Amino acid sequence: MKMIKPALLGTLMVPAFILAAGTANAENTTTMDATYLTSTPDGAFHADSLTGNQVKSSVEDDEDIGTINDLVIDEDGQIHAVVISVGGFLGMGEKDVAVAWDSLELVKDDDGDDYVIRVNASQDALEAAEEYERNTEVRERNAEMHEKNVENQENN
Protein backbone atom coordinates (compact mmCIF):
# COMPACT_ATOMS: atom_id res chain seq x y z
CA MET A 1 0.00 0.00 0.00
CA LYS A 2 2.89 2.35 0.66
CA MET A 3 4.08 1.98 -2.97
CA ILE A 4 0.73 3.06 -4.34
CA LYS A 5 0.64 6.35 -2.46
CA PRO A 6 3.81 7.84 -4.01
CA ALA A 7 2.71 6.68 -7.46
CA LEU A 8 -0.74 8.15 -6.94
CA LEU A 9 0.75 11.38 -5.60
CA GLY A 10 3.07 11.61 -8.64
CA THR A 11 0.16 11.06 -11.01
CA LEU A 12 -1.82 13.83 -9.35
CA MET A 13 1.10 16.26 -9.35
CA VAL A 14 1.89 16.02 -13.11
CA PRO A 15 -1.33 17.82 -14.14
CA ALA A 16 -0.69 20.43 -11.45
CA PHE A 17 2.79 21.14 -12.89
CA ILE A 18 1.40 21.33 -16.42
CA LEU A 19 -1.30 23.74 -15.29
CA ALA A 20 1.26 25.91 -13.47
CA ALA A 21 3.56 25.94 -16.52
CA GLY A 22 0.67 26.96 -18.75
CA THR A 23 -0.19 29.81 -16.41
CA ALA A 24 3.41 31.03 -16.34
CA ASN A 25 3.58 31.00 -20.14
CA ALA A 26 0.32 32.92 -20.38
CA GLU A 27 1.68 35.58 -18.05
CA ASN A 28 4.85 36.00 -20.15
CA THR A 29 3.02 36.25 -23.45
CA THR A 30 2.99 39.77 -24.83
CA THR A 31 1.20 41.18 -27.81
CA MET A 32 3.05 43.15 -30.42
CA ASP A 33 1.52 46.17 -32.08
CA ALA A 34 4.11 46.37 -34.84
CA THR A 35 3.77 46.96 -38.54
CA TYR A 36 5.57 44.44 -40.69
CA LEU A 37 6.85 44.82 -44.23
CA THR A 38 7.33 42.01 -46.69
CA SER A 39 9.15 44.11 -49.27
CA THR A 40 10.75 47.51 -49.73
CA PRO A 41 8.13 50.22 -50.40
CA ASP A 42 8.33 52.20 -53.63
CA GLY A 43 10.72 55.12 -53.31
CA ALA A 44 12.49 53.58 -50.31
CA PHE A 45 15.92 51.98 -50.16
CA HIS A 46 18.15 50.11 -47.74
CA ALA A 47 21.00 51.87 -45.93
CA ASP A 48 23.47 49.42 -47.43
CA SER A 49 22.55 50.71 -50.89
CA LEU A 50 24.27 53.94 -49.81
CA THR A 51 27.16 52.85 -47.61
CA GLY A 52 30.24 51.83 -49.54
CA ASN A 53 29.09 53.65 -52.68
CA GLN A 54 31.05 56.31 -54.46
CA VAL A 55 29.95 59.93 -54.29
CA LYS A 56 30.31 61.89 -57.48
CA SER A 57 30.87 65.61 -57.89
CA SER A 58 28.16 67.33 -59.91
CA VAL A 59 30.55 70.25 -60.49
CA GLU A 60 33.42 68.07 -61.76
CA ASP A 61 31.74 66.01 -64.51
CA ASP A 62 30.69 63.20 -62.17
CA GLU A 63 34.21 62.48 -60.92
CA ASP A 64 34.34 60.07 -57.97
CA ILE A 65 35.29 62.17 -54.96
CA GLY A 66 34.67 59.92 -51.97
CA THR A 67 32.93 56.92 -50.45
CA ILE A 68 29.96 56.89 -48.09
CA ASN A 69 31.06 55.28 -44.83
CA ASP A 70 28.11 55.95 -42.56
CA LEU A 71 24.78 57.69 -42.08
CA VAL A 72 23.90 60.13 -39.30
CA ILE A 73 20.33 59.31 -38.25
CA ASP A 74 18.30 61.01 -35.53
CA GLU A 75 16.04 59.31 -32.98
CA ASP A 76 13.04 59.80 -35.31
CA GLY A 77 14.79 57.82 -38.05
CA GLN A 78 15.53 60.81 -40.28
CA ILE A 79 18.86 60.91 -42.11
CA HIS A 80 20.65 64.16 -41.28
CA ALA A 81 23.95 63.58 -43.04
CA VAL A 82 26.15 61.08 -44.79
CA VAL A 83 29.72 60.55 -43.69
CA ILE A 84 31.97 60.57 -46.75
CA SER A 85 35.56 59.39 -46.72
CA VAL A 86 37.69 61.71 -48.87
CA GLY A 87 41.33 62.12 -49.80
CA GLY A 88 44.12 59.72 -49.12
CA PHE A 89 45.36 56.78 -51.11
CA LEU A 90 44.58 53.11 -50.47
CA GLY A 91 42.98 53.92 -47.13
CA MET A 92 45.85 56.05 -45.83
CA GLY A 93 45.41 59.75 -45.22
CA GLU A 94 41.63 59.63 -45.62
CA LYS A 95 39.33 61.71 -43.49
CA ASP A 96 35.60 61.66 -42.88
CA VAL A 97 33.46 64.64 -43.80
CA ALA A 98 29.76 64.84 -42.92
CA VAL A 99 27.61 66.27 -45.70
CA ALA A 100 24.00 67.27 -45.03
CA TRP A 101 21.48 64.83 -46.48
CA ASP A 102 19.70 67.56 -48.42
CA SER A 103 23.00 68.43 -50.16
CA LEU A 104 22.95 65.10 -51.98
CA GLU A 105 21.21 64.14 -55.17
CA LEU A 106 20.19 60.51 -55.62
CA VAL A 107 19.34 59.44 -59.16
CA LYS A 108 18.71 55.92 -60.45
CA ASP A 109 21.44 54.70 -62.78
CA ASP A 110 20.76 53.80 -66.43
CA ASP A 111 19.53 50.28 -65.70
CA GLY A 112 17.52 51.42 -62.65
CA ASP A 113 19.20 48.99 -60.25
CA ASP A 114 21.38 51.35 -58.24
CA TYR A 115 21.64 54.98 -57.27
CA VAL A 116 24.14 57.49 -58.54
CA ILE A 117 24.95 59.74 -55.60
CA ARG A 118 26.06 63.29 -56.36
CA VAL A 119 27.05 66.25 -54.23
CA ASN A 120 27.29 69.83 -55.45
CA ALA A 121 30.91 70.22 -54.33
CA SER A 122 34.36 69.53 -55.65
CA GLN A 123 36.81 67.02 -54.23
CA ASP A 124 39.03 69.92 -53.15
CA ALA A 125 36.11 71.47 -51.24
CA LEU A 126 35.41 68.22 -49.38
CA GLU A 127 39.09 67.68 -48.61
CA ALA A 128 39.26 71.24 -47.22
CA ALA A 129 36.13 70.75 -45.09
CA GLU A 130 36.42 70.20 -41.36
CA GLU A 131 36.81 66.54 -40.40
CA TYR A 132 33.77 64.81 -38.92
CA GLU A 133 34.47 63.14 -35.58
CA ARG A 134 32.01 61.01 -33.71
CA ASN A 135 31.65 62.37 -30.21
CA THR A 136 31.91 60.17 -27.15
CA GLU A 137 28.24 60.55 -26.24
CA VAL A 138 27.10 59.25 -29.62
CA ARG A 139 29.61 56.39 -29.49
CA GLU A 140 28.31 55.36 -26.06
CA ARG A 141 24.68 55.58 -27.20
CA ASN A 142 25.50 53.48 -30.28
CA ALA A 143 27.20 50.87 -28.08
CA GLU A 144 24.16 50.78 -25.76
CA MET A 145 21.78 50.38 -28.70
CA HIS A 146 23.94 47.59 -30.13
CA GLU A 147 24.02 45.82 -26.76
CA LYS A 148 20.22 46.03 -26.44
CA ASN A 149 19.80 44.67 -29.97
CA VAL A 150 22.08 41.73 -29.18
CA GLU A 151 20.14 41.02 -25.96
CA ASN A 152 16.82 41.17 -27.81
CA GLN A 153 18.09 38.75 -30.44
CA GLU A 154 19.34 36.35 -27.77
CA ASN A 155 15.99 36.47 -25.95
CA ASN A 156 13.97 35.72 -29.08
Image (cartoon, rainbow, N blue to C red):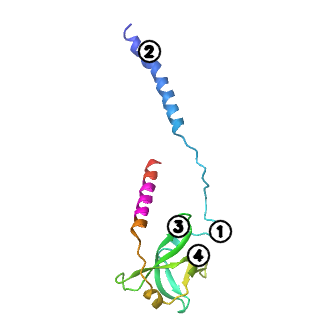
- The answer to which of 101 and 40 lies nearer the viewer is 101
Which of disc 4 and disc 1 is earlier in sequence?
A: 1
Q: Decide: marks 2, 4 in contact (CB < 8 A)?
A: no
Q: Give the residue at mark 3.
A: 74
Q: Residue 60 location in percent, x, y?
A: 53, 92
Q: Give the residue type at disc 1.
A: Asp
Q: Give the residue at mark 2.
A: 8
User: Would residue 36 be found to the left or right of residue 82 on screen?
Assistant: right
Tell me where the magenta segment starts and ends, as one range. Answer: 140-150
| Picture quadrant where residue 111 is located | bottom right
From this view, report whether residue 24 is shown above or below residue 53: above
Distance in Å between CA atoms under marks 2 and 3? 63 Å
- The answer to which of 52 and 144 lies nearer the viewer is 144
* Helix, strand or loop: magenta stretch: helix
Q: How crowded is mark 2: few (under 14 residues within 10 Å), some or many (20 or more)?
A: few
Q: Give the residue at mark 1.
A: 42
The label shown at residue 113 is: 4
Which of disc 4 and disc 2 is earlier in sequence?
A: 2
Which mark's residue is nearer the viewer, 2 or 3? 3
